[in-house]
Amino acid sequence: MDEWVQTKLAFDLTNCQLSQANKQTPSYFSFADYLAKLERDSWATYATFYPHCENICFSYNSMIWYNEQDHPLFIKIRQASK
């Protein structure tokens, strides 16, 4: 995943988390402006999501790959887990 996509995902996840926690999300004109306005908990939330976005996407891609496999072993595993 390129840096822009990772930044955008972390940004969106941060805004979602802050919104659900009834915390104000900073207004912004650019990502640099947005990041400059993050403070304490907000910055920690963004800094946590940024490296985890890659792991989240890897997990989803792995699940998609797993569900698309036609090998008999994968079919039996999927049937057993239902």
Image (cartoon, rainbow, N blue to C red):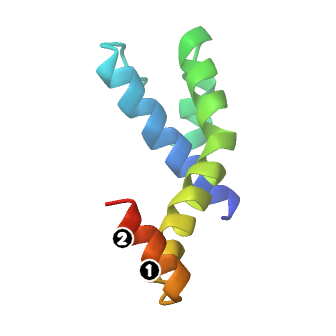
Where is residue 38? Give x, y as percent. Answer: 57, 20
Where residue 10 appears, as percent x and y from the top left, is 55, 42
Q: Amino acid at mark 1?
A: Ile
Kindly state the secondary structure of the residue where label 2 is placed. Answer: helix
At label 2, the amino acid type is Gln
Residue beneath label 2, please? Answer: 79
Q: Residue at x 40, y 22 (%)?
A: 18
The residue where tag 1 is placed is 75
Assign a secondary structure to mark 1. Answer: helix
Q: Is residue 54 above or below residue 74?
A: above
Would you say the residues marked 1 and 2 are in contact, meaning their CB atoms lie under 8 Å apart? yes
Alpha-carbon distance for marks 1 and 2? 6 Å
Q: Quadrant of residue 78?
A: bottom left
Q: Position of residue 75 (x, y in %)?
A: 44, 80
Task: Characterize the local packing of mark 1: few (<14), some (14-19) or many (20 or more) Cα atoms within 10 angstroms.
Answer: some
Q: Quadrant of residue 20?
A: top left
Mark 2 Cα shell of 10 Å, populated few (<14), some (14-19), many (≥20)? few
Query: Could you say which quadrant of the image residue 27 lies in?
Result: top left
Q: Residue at x 53, y 76 (%)?
A: 65
Quadrant placement of the C terminus: bottom left
Can you say which quadrant of the picture contains the N terminus? bottom right
Residue at x 57% of width, y 57% of height: 59
